[in-house]
Amino acid sequence: MSEAHRVAVVGCGVFGAVTALRLAEEGHRVTVFERARRPLSQASFNNQNRLHLGFHYPRDRTTAEQCVRGYQRFREEFAPCVVTDFPNGYFVAEEGSAVTPRQYLDFCDAVGLRYQRVEPADYRPPVTGVALGLLTEEAVIDCGQLRDLLTARLADSTVTVRLGTDVREVVERGDRYLLRTDEGDAGTFDSVVNCGFADINRLNRQLGHPAPERQYEYTAVLVVEWDHPPVGVTVMDGRFTTLLPFGRSGHFLLYHVEHSVLDRVTARVAPTRWRGREPEDLVREDLEGRFRRMLGEATRFVPSLGTARLRDVLHGPRVVLAHRDDTDARPSMVNTPGPGYVTVFSGKLDHSVWAADEVVRRVRERAA
Ligand SMILES: Cc1cc2nc3c(=O)[nH]c(=O)nc-3n(C[C@H](O)[C@H](O)[C@H](O)COP(=O)(O)OP(=O)(O)OC[C@H]3O[C@@H](n4cnc5c(N)ncnc54)[C@H](O)[C@@H]3O)c2cc1C
């Protein structure tokens, strides 16, 4: 019997975890390296927890269609972590929206998204300052439960997980790769899958592969208490607010397209100063003041949100394609810049399922 193909996965966010499990099921010998002490503790936890069905991307058909492709499979594969029992509305702002109500409805119909029209004043809570309201079937993900589920699945699998281990360098050794970590050499691998999200380009650059300019953002999603049953309100399409249930916690996540971005840089690699930022660093950013500004914006659309209180903050880096403000594109991309070296640039959580299929196909070809 031939020896198992050895695969290193860099990063244990949702993309790294799902990919590692799928590769192990194929019979590969998989090791995942994660810099943080916990899996799914970076962007895979610090996000808006929306299980995107496509409604958010009327200006980028590719992203919308990738969400349609990922939504149902993600829901089935991670059913215990998916929260659906709440009304979830999308609304088009009367002023300042990049799409008109007609364009938005045409987009939904063209992509095949199902919705019910809703009178904004009759929604609970009533929504003001909007010209169109749609009730959708979009869900949210309880990212804490997703972390627990994937951690348990990894523990039950043949995958070796090395937490608290930073991959500093990947070096080509003949037709294999040597990984150097902060703890020393970690051995050689036949394939490397880079799921490092905001840090993908660092290793790409070391290996001499393309490391295109990206837009890096340090973001803050606010966790708020509000005496209201779980509900979703997303105002489209521009610099507006989103309110969503925070998984099953009973709290809400408040996000604003502009005010939730604390820092933004267009560069080839993410700023190292962002690594390991603690909540205390953010206090200096005046979170309470930011919350007040976000609440001021949000109550233009949801007046009853004025009683909400700031409870916590989810923060960390995000990477998106550079110079795409016109479309707000958030696609996921699987690439093979070198033999046996696969990169996964992730756009949305639910893309992780089909992105893993794509990685498995590429590693299978390499192992053949
Ligand atoms: C504010 C915000 C809101 C968002 N809202 C949503 C949303 O509502 N719905 C949605 O679907 N998506 C959303 N996203 C996007 C989504 O969060 C990401 O697409 C997804 O979490 C990325 O998963 P990942 O596994 O690629 O990245 P991560 O979860 O960040 O995992 C990458 C991991 O790699 C590790 N790593 C990196 N380099 C190394 C190295 N050299 N050695 C060891 N470890 C390394 C990091 O520590 C990290 O844990 C949002 C993102 C942000 C920031």
Image: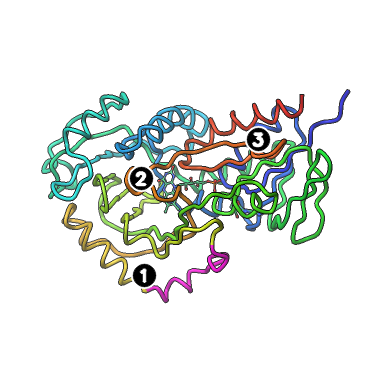
Could you tell me how far apart the alpha carbons at marks 2 and 1 are, in whole angstroms? 26 Å
Spot occupied by residue 33 in the image (x, y as percentages of width and height):
69, 50
Badge 1: few (under 14), some or many (20 or more) residues near its Cα, within 10 Å?
some
Q: Which mark is residue 328?
A: 2
List the residue tagged with mark 1.
287
Q: Which mark is residue 268?
A: none
Badge 2: few (under 14), some or many (20 or more) residues near its Cα, within 10 Å?
some
- In the image, which is nearer the foreground, mark 2 or mark 1? 2
First reached walking from the N terminus: tag 3 or tag 1: 3
Nearest the viewer among 257 and 96 is 96
Spot occupied by residue 81 in the image (x, y as percentages of width and height):
47, 39
Q: Amino acid at mark 2?
A: Asp
Identify the secondary structure beneath mark 3: helix
First reached walking from the N terminus: tag 2 or tag 1: 1
Residue that sits furthest to the right in the current view: 1
Q: Which residues are magenta?
A: 271-285
Residue at disc 3, CB closer than 8 Å to ligand 1: no
List the residue tagged with mark 3.
21
**In the rendered image, the vertical position of residue 91 relative to residue 225, given as above or below:** above
Residue beneath the point at 16% across and 56% down? 300
Q: Which image quarter is the C terminus in?
A: top right
Residue that sits furthest to the bottom in the current view: 284
Nearest the viewer among 74 and 84 is 74
Q: Amino acid at mark 1?
A: Leu
Spot occupied by residue 91 in the image (x, y as percentages of width and height):
21, 42
**In the rendered image, the vertical position of residue 125 relative to residue 22, given as above or below:** below
Identify the secondary structure beneath mark 1: helix
